[in-house]
Image (cartoon, coloured by chain):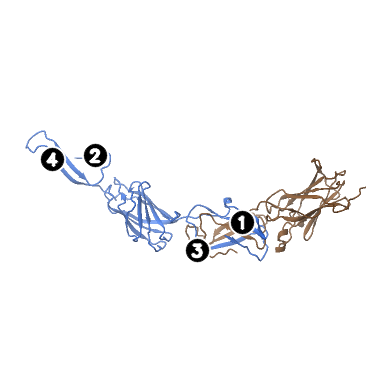
Amino acid sequence: MHFTAAAAVPGTLTVTSSSAINGVVDATLNFQLRAVQPFLAHGCVTATLPKVNQNYLALGASAQGLITNACCGGAFTVTASSQSPGGATSAQPLSAAQPPRFQAKSDSDALRVCLYNAADLAAGTTIILAITPITNPPSLKAISGFEAAITDENGNAVEATTGTYGMGTTAPGGFYAGPGIPGAADSSGTTSVTIATGKYMVGEADQRYDFTLYPAGAMPMGAKLFLTLPSAWRLDCNAASSLP
Amino acid sequence: MQGWPSTSSYRPAPGPIKFSLSGMTNPTTTTEQYFAVTTYHQDGSQYLIDRLLASEKMLKLQFSTGVVTVTRIMPTDGMIYSSAGAYNFTMSFQHPILATYALEITVPRTLQVLQKAGCGVLGLGASYLCAGDASGNMITLRGLVGSSTLASGTPISFSVQQVIQNPGTFIAPGEFSFKVVTADGGKVDTGTFTDSNATHYYGSYITAFNATSSSRVAGKQPVSITFTLKPKNVVAAGAYMVL
């Protein structure tokens, strides 16, 4: 029998994505929790995952989970490993009796993962969960609110992180060229610009250019769009523009 | 240019986002043009969402030139080698011609454009500029229409004076090419005209001929006779004379 330590003993949590690019939907989340206490045999980790569009929720967005489509029955995988205080890494099997359990909540989601380590892991061991697929945050503004708790196999608290941890990306997403853009209502849509009158002759005046864009990331209310014209093409600043 | 997409709703990926630019004038180049787009989440600071670089060539437009329609080219002086006459041109343009546009006429190599900083043109306004470029065999005309605009499709006729030298043989001139360009060199209209008429040109003539004997004594022999002649035009290298 193990004696559990008091809850809220601080652990250290590092959360990263395998992709540095905004909005990608097939990245892998690396959830690295360094336990202060020994990690008990058959111990479990509960990860608190903020909504991926956390920064947009106040703007009218519907909450979207970090794990791609996990809310809606989509498949995801979790693999576990550990790194000893000395740096040795070992794969850790998951408990067949208690498979990963995802629970969607209103402001964040929870994922409980139970390992099947036969013996206690030494104090200071880092438990690493690789969760795939996840969706990266839609903008370079990081999301925060990651937390972790360690319990024994019966759910008794061992330790937990204090405070919250964040995760961000460093590179903007792109635009889909199309056709066949995933998630688009129009399967023939393409990112393109056309001339409404069909007059593609040089020097034609009073033309309307129609732009259609399929961004990888969501556009929240108040978002800005910058359009850069070709350098040798002067913008007619007297022209009325329909830019919203 | 920047804008704020509709603020009435949250727009999930992948959109689409649609917007238009109205009242634009197409550029005067046929080189492909690429737009770039960047979207930002505005939340106190600006946070990049998505970026489309011009180098990705996803948002592109390419434009085509209009047509110069040439209906007539005629020399007023058909004598071979002559540059004393004029060449009459009649043409129209698919685009309106502005005062700032220039017309470049590239002349076939059967003819020779003379190097001239200024050449005379009849039929244009008072403020025209004409230049002959011998190396490029090209004539450039500016100020075709003065301060007004020549409407699309309106025919104009003009006569370029003493800047084209006729060929040395009785041949058809061949292909002239025309290009209307903006002040910064952008192409507006282009066209060609092939003059396959071989009857434009005729021979030059001798303006003076004199023969003088070395002796005026009847029956004296031998004597030498000196012929003096003055050709009207250039005598080409390798030319010969039949007496």
Q: Earlier in the sequence, mark 4 or mark 1?
A: 1
Give the residue at mark 3.
A206
Q: Nearer the viewer, residue B163 or A133?
A: B163
**Which mark is in front, 4 or 1?**
1
Q: Nearer the viewer, residue B99 or A113?
A: B99
Question: Are discs 4 and 2 both within one chain?
Answer: yes
Give the residue at mark 2.
B240
Q: Tell me, by letter, which chain the rendering colours brown.
A: A
Disc 4: CA contacts within 10 A as few (<14), some (14-19) or many (>=20): few
How far is mark 4 from mark 2, CA to CA? 21 Å
Q: What subunit carries mark 3?
A: A
How far is mark 1 from mark 2, CA to CA? 75 Å
How far is mark 3 from mark 4, CA to CA? 78 Å
Residue A189 visible in the shown view: no
Picture residue at 71% right of the left edge, 59% below the top = A55
Please provide percent x and percent y for residue A152. 88, 50
Give the residue at mark 1.
B38
Q: What subunit carries mark 2?
A: B
Q: Tell me, by letter, which chain the rendering colours blue.
A: B
Tell me the element at label 3: loop
Disc 1: CA contacts within 10 A as few (<14), some (14-19) or many (>=20): many
